[in-house]
Amino acid sequence: MVVALGKKLSRALLGAIMSICAVGGAAYAADWTEGTPIGEARAFGAAAAHGETVYVAGGAGLERPVADFMAYDTIGDIWRPLPTMPVGRQGFGMAAAIDGGVYVAGGYAGEDFDTPSAELWRYDMANAVWVRMSDMPAGRARHGMASVEGKLYVVGGEGPNASRVFVYDTFKAEWTDLGADLPSPRTDLGVVAANGAVYALGGRTGSGVTSLVHKLDVPANRWSSVAAMPAPRADAAFGVLGGRIHVAGGRSNDPMRTFSEHYVLDTAGGRWQTQPPLPLPRLGAASAGAGDMFVIVGGSGGAGVFSLFTTTDVVNIYKP
């Protein structure tokens, strides 16, 4: 999934390729700003927020899977390098939990893109160390993970029994099978926690990219349907600000296109609204809501084969 083109591809060249391959580019709206670039272009990594800090890990770089682990200070607009992950990986789930840990689960580790990993790693924010925890019940990649009240919910993706929802109790340090399958199994979806519930948004099913949204009520552990997204999207950026779920960018499958549209779901009212579009159309970006900012890091400007060589290090920030 990674093409070794080298770092000689400048950000200017990448931007030109992105503008040619992507669809729906737009000038910066007043609510969007550009933050300090992360430094190495990447896509299909992940992010998690703790307070006003966004942690970003991994992804497919220009030359290899990225093992970098970085902290972005949204107030100071500063990147801080942290101890790297044990191995570069992409297509994994990531979430911050109330036990003081940032967790990374599954994905494709190293250059093995045939076998989804079952590994769970915990980064201790207080002691700045990575510790391997108990493996998931099965390997999983191209999934999402969200944290609710000390429990991690692994939803969607590909791997054995990928429709099953795995739950990790961070205090008991043990995995369980939720016993309630995701109603529409899919990969490349968004998984976020909002108002104490877990949401599964969009993604790619066996028949194509979908706009479906499902909500998992916790602790009842029951799925219900929620108003579908205004358009089908996979590999989009997702974040939660004040109980509102933001969705930006992503791709369709038929035709294969990359988008900049930005939608917001009011979880209380159950209605979608259109917001100013993402300045750089792209897919596979790491993203999270931190404080009052929706932060989007990296990604690719082109869909399909173009995603291999249109990765970027750009950081876009939406602040309503």
Image (tube, rainbow, N blue to C red):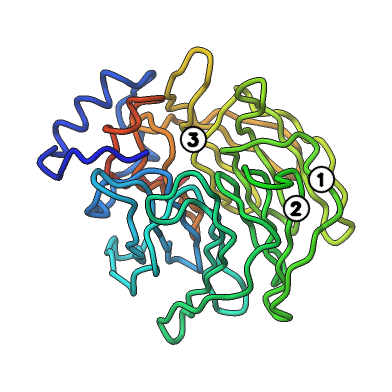
Marks 2 and 1, how far apart in space? Answer: 6 Å
Marks 1 and 3, how far apart in space? Answer: 26 Å
Could you tell me which quadrant the N terminus lies in? top left
Residue under label 1: 181
Quadrant assignment, res 27: top left
Q: Are marks 2 and 3 in contact (CB under 8 Å)?
A: no
Quadrant assignment, res 219: bottom right
Closest to the observer, 317 or 58: 58
The percent position of residue 131, horizontal first and vertical second, equals 50, 79
Closest to the observer, 242 or 312: 312
- The residue sitting at 63% across, 33% down in the picture is 202
Residue type marked 1? Asp
Asked if residue 297 lies left or right of residue 174, the reply is left
The percent position of residue 247, horizontal first and vertical second, equals 54, 37
Q: Residue furthest left?
A: 8
The percent position of residue 205, horizontal first and vertical second, equals 66, 28
Residue under label 3: 248
Marks 2 and 3, how far apart in space? Answer: 25 Å
Q: Residue furthest bottom?
A: 127
- Secondary structure beneath disc 3? strand
Residue under label 2: 165
- Above or below residue 204? Residue 241 is below
Q: Earlier in the sequence, mark 1 or mark 3?
A: 1
Residue type marked 3? Ala
- Secondary structure beneath disc 1? loop
- Above or below residue 188? Residue 93 is below
Quadrant assignment, res 231: top right
- Secondary structure beneath disc 2? loop
- The residue sitting at 40% across, 59% down in the picture is 56
Q: Are marks 2 and 1 in contact (CB under 8 Å)?
A: yes
Q: Earlier in the sequence, mark 2 or mark 1?
A: 2
